Image (cartoon, helix red, strand yellow):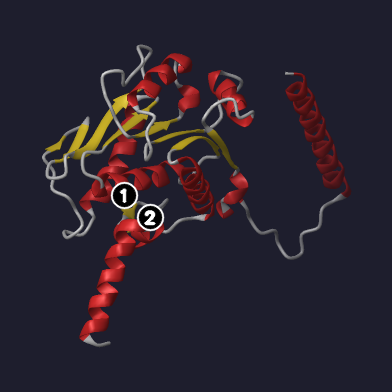
Amino acid sequence: MSWLENILAEGEHGAKLRNDLEYFCEHALKLRPKSGPLEPFKFNVAQKKLHALLDEQKAKTGRVRAVILKARQLGISTYTAARFYHRTIHSPGLRTIILGHERRASSNLFQIVKRFHDNLSDELRPSVGTSNAEELIFDRIDSGYIVAVASGEGTGRSATAQLLHASEVAFWDDLPVQMAALMQTVPDLPGTEIILETTANGFNDLHSLWRKAEASESEFMPVFLSWSLDPDYRTETAPDFVMSADENSSLASILLVWAGIGRRLLSARAAA
């Protein structure tokens, strides 16, 4: 490769790091896998699906407003952390809020961000002016993070941010009050993003928020990410495995039960 080709290749690499989130994650970020040492962050199937949906919404509306109902262990919190870290270090004057349902959850999310930052190459890592349990501020670009815990008083009323990562919202106390405060925290401007992500927690305030999103009665896009997107939830049967008559009968009974539940849910939804 000639010197000119080297320069062009480096220029293309730099542009992709700045403009292509998936490329940035794979070539710049490190994450802790389910086992073993740190490794490059390569999108899995669920993360690819979510990334496409969020970028599609942003292209259409200029902003992101999404409520994500997810299975466990799909890497959705990690994806959201990476998406917002990429924006935060490349956008002067930008603030990101991380908000969990309890202090430990908020701290765990913040640790993902700090791990990204600590393992970023020197030429990409912005300088830090403030770093503690509740803030990470990049002084030279005046961007950074605020970390908090969802509380009944409506966390975030005194803050202003452009990006909000709200985790396990189905487990928040008094979600309507929290949402009213958060919608004041993030202005309704192009480029802003609010991502609410959670596992299920029964028929509660999150269920109501989800139903409104499904019915297009709010600005939030509903995104359902099933356990079936993760190959780790599957296992191969033995080559000589054959279901017995009793097992076939039990499986048929289970499927009938689930079909009945599905019909009742659809009927209830149609009547609502």
Q: Which amino acid, by three-letter code, is at mark 1? A: His
- Is 125 located above or below residue 129 in the figure? below
- Is 97 located above or below residue 239 in the figure? above
Residue 222 location in percent, x, y?
57, 35
Residue 86, disc: 1
Q: Which element type, helix, strand or loop, lies under badge 2?
A: helix
Q: Which residue is mark 2?
A: 21
Left/right of residue 252 with respect to residue 228 in the rendered view: right
**Residue at 25% across / 46% down in the picture?**
91
**Residue at 35% across / 12% down in the picture?**
153
Q: Which amino acid, by three-letter code, is at mark 2? A: Leu
Residue 235 visible to the viewer? yes
The one of 94 and 147 positioned closer to us in this rendering: 94
The one of 2 and 46 positioned closer to us in this rendering: 2
Residue 40 visible to the viewer? no
Which quadrant would the N terminus be assigned to in this image?
Answer: bottom left
State the image quarter where residue 238 is shown: bottom right
State the image quarter where residue 177 is shown: top left
**Residue at 56% across / 39% down in the picture?**
223
Contact? badges 2 and 1 (CB < 8 Å): yes
